[in-house]
Amino acid sequence: MSTIADVVRVAQEAKRASAELALLSTQAKRKALLLMAKGLLKDTSSIKRANARDIKDAEAKGFSGALIDRLRLTDSRIKDMAQSLKAITSLKDPVGSIGEWRKRPNGLLIGKMRVSIGVVGIIYESRPNVTSDSVGLCLMSGNALILRGGSEAINSNLAIYSSLIKSAKASGIPKGAIGFIKSTDRRAVGVLLKQRDLVDLIIPRGGESLIKMVAETSRIPVIKHYKGVCHTYVDKEADLDMAEEISFNAKVQRPGVCNAMETLLVHKKVAKEFLPSVAKRLRDAQVEMRGCARTRKILKGIKAATNKDWPEEYLDLILSVKVVDSIDDAIAHIACFGSQHSDAIITEDRRAADKFLRSVDSAAVYINASTRFTDGGQFGMGAELGISTDRLHARGPMGLVELTTYKYVVYGDGQIRK
Amino acid sequence: MSTIADVVRVAQEAKRASAELALLSTQAKRKALLLMAKGLLKDTSSIKRANARDIKDAEAKGFSGALIDRLRLTDSRIKDMAQSLKAITSLKDPVGSIGEWRKRPNGLLIGKMRVSIGVVGIIYESRPNVTSDSVGLCLMSGNALILRGGSEAINSNLAIYSSLIKSAKASGIPKGAIGFIKSTDRRAVGVLLKQRDLVDLIIPRGGESLIKMVAETSRIPVIKHYKGVCHTYVDKEADLDMAEEISFNAKVQRPGVCNAMETLLVHKKVAKEFLPSVAKRLRDAQVEMRGCARTRKILKGIKAATNKDWPEEYLDLILSVKVVDSIDDAIAHIACFGSQHSDAIITEDRRAADKFLRSVDSAAVYINASTRFTDGGQFGMGAELGISTDRLHARGPMGLVELTTYKYVVYGDGQIRK
């Protein structure tokens, strides 16, 4: 009962703060973020002490090493958090900018003004740096926010939040603009997802099961991605050296992230030449390959890929490989098994490239580059609050602009409708 | 049971058709719409016969005259439907256009390509012209659609659909791209609203209760507006002649639509001069005024406005009037009682105008013009599929561009992530 009242109160305060926050000057927002960055550095030891409690609990519960690593805060990770806040202050503030002007025959001047979305709820797991990244991006885009981190990181998140809120107060950020749900009761999330009159957008960040739960429960619009099953298609007109570099990079450079390649598709005309060479490099980098029947005729001894492999996000040094008859087959495979995240074609044939670009329905479609570039920083958007594979509002990296919406502004000098 | 299977089948066919439709050339889409326009004119008598059955049923059920008028199809209304389809063919096709190019330091060239949303479900009441308008706008923006009209118009809608589908077939529109749910069973809507894997967007069009039901039931994103409680605020620095013309226009020119003014807010400094003059014109036009206490001291004998009046969408010749102490009070009133649709300030004071523009959180905010202009045609967007007062994806009139989304297209020449 008190959990429910608590969540509603936090949401009401965020809603109340949002109107004032939406009108805050760029300068005031930058000042607040810089103060927060300083504060985090000053509070490093208390944040680390809180984090140590989470780590101890996680170890006692027998959590995996990977999870504990994601949870752990070191001096350098806290410095990175502060650095991210600073970096956000150097980005262009989209709020209040007016574009797409049009003048109507009756003299009306119509433009679109970028405005804040309102109140954003962030539901996340494990990595405590999401706390400060979310605060930085939401405040800079004029959005109030409500944080709801996982119970495994509650002490760390609370310590980071306490540090940030001190700086927020000192720099005049409206009270309630940064909401934090302290209860780790699971029902709190359910209550938050029902506050349609108070919360405008939910962004879940974490594993697929968390995101599924949020998407299925929420009565508020959700922007999300479930997973990244990214493909590289090596066309019959590919520069095979380039194809090898790009495939290797997309799989190996950082296999545990959503824009890493999970499936390599190769046109049958180049498979015999291309596969042995790239396979050698991949094998040297400890990549396990799983192939279709035709692949296994060329790469003897590798495991067979099953229908379970094609839709799988390995997030690991594993790669499924398929030989296809045509670019159409590659496009059909991606439509069937892809996750609408990031997919690439390697080709020197402009018409094939155009066809792939038009037909593949993913948030980012590449010609002759590694899918690893789908990232707010790499796209030149500065920071990002996750990547969207949804179809509405925002697709791909969600930066400051994607955290805003627009309204029409209409300048007249007495126009009436005839 | 058969209703459920039927709805799912229609949605599956639309989904299947959507990929091909999304890639159709502008020319092919224009050709199809022109053929449909011709077909409607040719089928006028059969459409009118079907409509007569709906009118007869409605009369037998004792429906109101206004409802029967919305339902009725005449030669000229069918001509208008055909004309709307033709008008859509003259609009710019947004699908496939690439904008917002950026070049990254590593040479990657990144742009945003406009792409179709996919499958759009339209749930609507009464006016049968929504059938052909929806088909025209969805097809031109490359979206498959599923139509679900009200039972009161089922014969008319079916006749229009049958005419359109003949032309669609003859012009090579993929089979299933225009879905129609024939069952008038209410459960059909519930089933449609659950097809999250098949349908990308729901647009409800009709009364507030229909829209509320859809928004509360849907597991698919919904874009909508509940109602239009539009305000005109006459500032202390207003040109009072202009204020009178605009207020009169916004209330009287067409009171039954969502962008008509429902509440007039007047700054106390100009109330005594402004109100008597505008009230005389409004009274002559049969407008019933309901005022706050201060208004009633100036306009003797008018009814008192209650707290029920301020959030009310009259859609009629009724106007609530309030005297406010300041522009801040006007903004606060709009924030409290408005519907985030369209609101105007009348002022010669540029700072007041800017403040209103920034602070009022509506889909369209006006300076010195009538709110009646919030409309796809008036905004220069050609046709529209309703008006959104939501915060995400699209706000205001929903034209062709608003019926698309985007994907990132990335051109490289071998870039890999370091």
Image (cartoon, coloured by chain):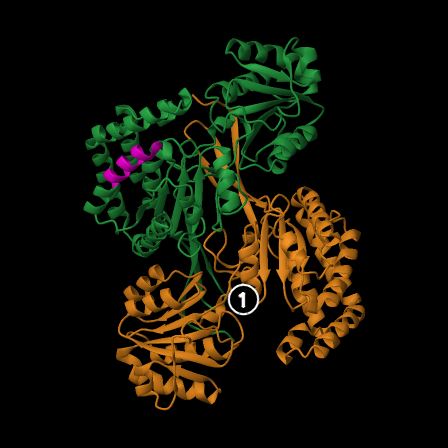
Chain colours: A green, B orange
Residue at image point 61% right, 38% down: A358
Near-viewer residue (A231 or B417): A231
The residue lying furthest to the front in this view is A1
Is B406 inside the magenta-drawn segment?
Answer: no
Please determine whether, in this image, residue A253 is positioned above or below residue B38: above
* Residue segment shown in magenta: A153-164
Near-viewer residue (A214 or B380): A214
User: Which chain is mark 1 on?
Assistant: B
Is A156 inside the magenta-drawn segment?
Answer: yes
The x, y position of residue A381, in whole percent, is: 40, 37
Residue at image point 66% right, 25% down: A307
The x, y position of residue B11, in whole percent, is: 68, 48
Please determine whether, in this image, residue B52 is positioned above or below residue A79: below
Residue located beneath label 1 in the image: B208
**Magenta residues, dominant SS class:** helix
Residue at image point 28% right, 64% down: B351
The x, y position of residue A272, in whole percent, is: 67, 13
